Amino acid sequence: MNLLRPIVLALSLGASLPAFANTESGDPRYTIQNPPAYAMIGDLLIARPLLLAATVIGAGAFVVSLPFTALGGGVGDAGKALVVDPAKATFVRCLGCIGEGFERQD
């Protein structure tokens, strides 16, 4: 019994160490996220299809609103909000991450 206690303690401590791991890279320009498996699965099956639909719908809305936004001078802002931001969240962001995969911090 005395031999079993340190083994169980070592295994339980070893299993909990990744929870305390620092997910920051050494480079201050980039942050690296390490999402759990359930977040990746949920992102793959739920979030990415919804974001793809949002990108397609946003592109359609951008084309429809283009004459009006051109008159107001907000084409760049409308394109970024309706097309670029959903597309970045769909295709650039790592699977299960909250932000983009490698965010540059200037």
Image (tube, grey):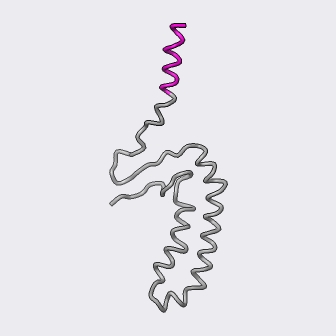
Which span of residues is magenta-colored? Answer: 1-14
Q: Position of residue 55 (x, y in %)?
A: 60, 70
Q: Position of residue 101 (x, y in %)?
A: 48, 54
In-image side of 76 versus 95 (left or right): left
In this view of the protein, which residue sits in the foreground, 8 or 77? 8
Q: Position of residue 28 (x, y in %)?
A: 33, 51
Asked if residue 5 lies in the magenta stretch, the reply is yes
In this view of the protein, which residue sits in the foreground, 106 or 38? 38
Most extreme residue toward the bottom, as rendered? 71
The number of discs equals 0
Judge whether 53 appears above or below 2 on screen. Answer: below
| Quarter of the rendering containing residue 106 | bottom left
Judge whether 99 appears above or below 82 on screen. Answer: above
Asked if residue 36 lies in the magenta stretch, the reply is no
Q: Which residue is drawn at 47% across and 48% down?
A: 33
Q: Which residue is drawn at 51% across and 68% down?
A: 85
